[in-house]
Amino acid sequence: KAGVTQTPRYLIKTRGQQVTLSCSPISGHRSVSWYQQTPGQGLQFLFEYFSETQRNKGNFPGRFSGRQFSNSRSEMNVSTLELGDSALYLCASSLDPAGAQDTQYFGPGTRLTVL
Amino acid sequence: DQQVKQNSPSLSVQEGRISILNCDYTNSMFDYFLWYKKYPAEGPTFLISISSIKDKNEDGRFTVFLNKSAKHLSLHIVPSQPGDSAVYFCAVTPAGKLIFGQGTELSVKP
């Protein structure tokens, strides 16, 4: 069974631009969560989607948004990029909603650099 | 406001010896705890978990201990192997999300 895939793996953008990252969960998984990893803040929860609905959102500004499609694939969008948005963005999928003690499986991440 | 803390950013251990990674949490309502391992350029991978109804869970070389009164959990790796060198994160799962500690980088020397 294929794992969680994320595209692109690396991305370089400039301040003010917007970016869209994509995540394909493990086949059959309906929950997709997004996390941001930075050296200073560690791994922080962005949001979770289940059955095309956002179930949970972390403490991030409205510039960060996401969506989930009927095939469970998810995208996250960051508008008006800032230097501090440079991070590794990780996607995780699980069968059931996160928090139901179902293991989340992570993709390799997208490394975003904002210049 | 760090709800999950890993106070040791790094740990170095000799191959064959025991590695002990520690994690403290603040909320006594947390009832499920996990450890993830992360290699560079890869996403975290699930290692082992424990429910608050237990105080120990074992899986091969990995054992997690939970001390609810102290709000403390630890991961023991015995014996440690060079391939165990990675960053280890403890995490809790309240309200539909994973909250991670800052991670401890384990280095196992041959």
Image (cartoon, coloured by chain):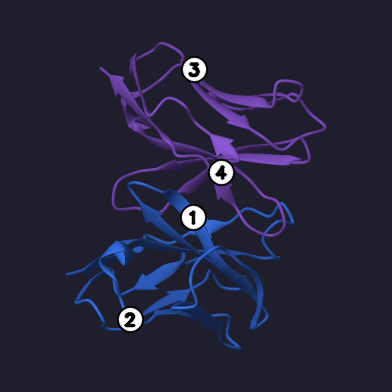
Q: Give the chain ID for the purple colour.
A: B
Question: Mark 1 is on which residue type?
Answer: Gln
The chain that hosts pointer 1 is: A
Residue underneath mark 1: A44
Q: Are discs 3 and 4 less than 8 Å apart at CB? A: no
Residue at (35%, 46%) from the top-left corner?
A40
Q: Of helix, strand and loop, which one carries label 1?
A: strand
Of discs 1 and 3, which sits in the foreground? 1
Q: CA distance from mark 3 to mark 4?
A: 33 Å
**Any mark on residue A80, and which?**
2
Q: Give the chain ID for the blue colour.
A: A
The chain that hosts pointer 2 is: A
User: Relative to A43, is B30 on the left or the right?
Assistant: right
Residue B87 is at least partly visible in this image: yes
Q: Position of residue A98 (x, y in %)?
A: 67, 61
Residue at (58%, 49%) from the top-left corner?
B99
The chain that hosts pointer 4 is: B
- Asked if both marks, 4 and 2, belong to the same chain, the answer given is no
**Any mark on residue B1, and which?**
4
- Asked if both marks, 2 and 1, belong to the same chain, the answer given is yes
